[in-house]
Image (tube, rainbow, N blue to C red):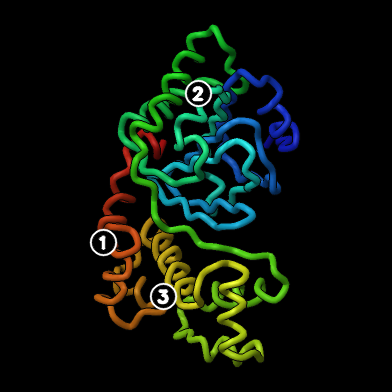
Amino acid sequence: MEKIDYNQILLDTDEVPHSAYIWHMKTEHHFPFHKHNKGQLTYVEGGAAFLYTREKTYFLPARHYMWVPAGVEHYFAHRYPANYVRSIYFFTEKEDANEPFYSTTGIYPVTNLLLEMLLFTSRWEGNIMPGTKPFTFIKAMKYLLPEISTSPLPITLPTSDNPRMSPILRFIQENIAEPLTMETVCQKFNTSERTLTRLFRSTMDISFFQYLKIARMSRAMGYLMETDKTISEIAWDTGYNSVSAFSNTFFKLTGRRPSDYQHLSKSIPPEEEA
């Protein structure tokens, strides 16, 4: 397999300010924290991924794309190297300031129209220069995005590099199926509930219980999209002993029932699976 120079790709994306830049990779990429002078659309075919920024962790389920505004530090991680990762870096224009979409990080459903357009770009790689037919196509795609992307996915999971907070968050993630409580976490890290409450609020502006709920729902979305587990198995594996409580919490956070996400993952068009 040809070795990929990731640093060169990062340089190439911004080399021509007024171009669009496209790459499609059927491999796992290992970019560190980085940023671009262009807005980025990334779509992972047939699987899920995570986007990490300095402030939050975003779960990117199947049939959704991630929009990363210019200047936002980030990196992606996805679990299945065999899946295509398609990224388009869009040129920045003065008029972008009038459209809030372009300056807001978000996860959006991929409509059938956008999916067909994304698949059509698979014939191009690298810089797409102004004045060419491919550039006209990419420009139309850019202008279409705010029109079709009006319902961002509501789940984002805050993160923190605070040295006291990082091991606590890691412990929660590694034991998400356990009946975690503030008391058990405090005992594990030899701290008081008052201190833990203040730590969550001061470092991430969220409560312990809110974080635990969102972490469990993020994990559940991954299971729903990537496994054949039943709803009851997923509820159990994310710390719930009641399917109805799990389903109701999922609906309140996402606006959909867990079964809807399972259906979504099973309805990926054949072109994506090629």
Quadrant of the rendered image containing residue 24: top right
Q: Which corner quadrant holds the C terminus? A: top left
Dot 1 amino acid type = Arg
| Left or right for 264, reference 159 | left
Foreground tag (1 vs 2): 2
Quadrant of the rendered image containing residue 115: top left
Callout 3–callout 1 Cβ contact below 8 Å: no
Above or below, 163 against 155 in this view is below
Query: In the current view of this chain or complex, which residue is farthest to the front?
Result: 98
- Which residue position is annotated with label 2? 95
Q: Which mark is residue 237?
A: 3
Q: Residue at x 71, y 23 (%)?
A: 15
- The x and y percentages for residue 116 are 36, 28
> Callout 2: 10 Å neighbours few (<14), some, many (20+)?
few
Q: In this orientation, which residue lies closer to the viewer: 4 or 31?
A: 31
Dot 3 amino acid type = Asp
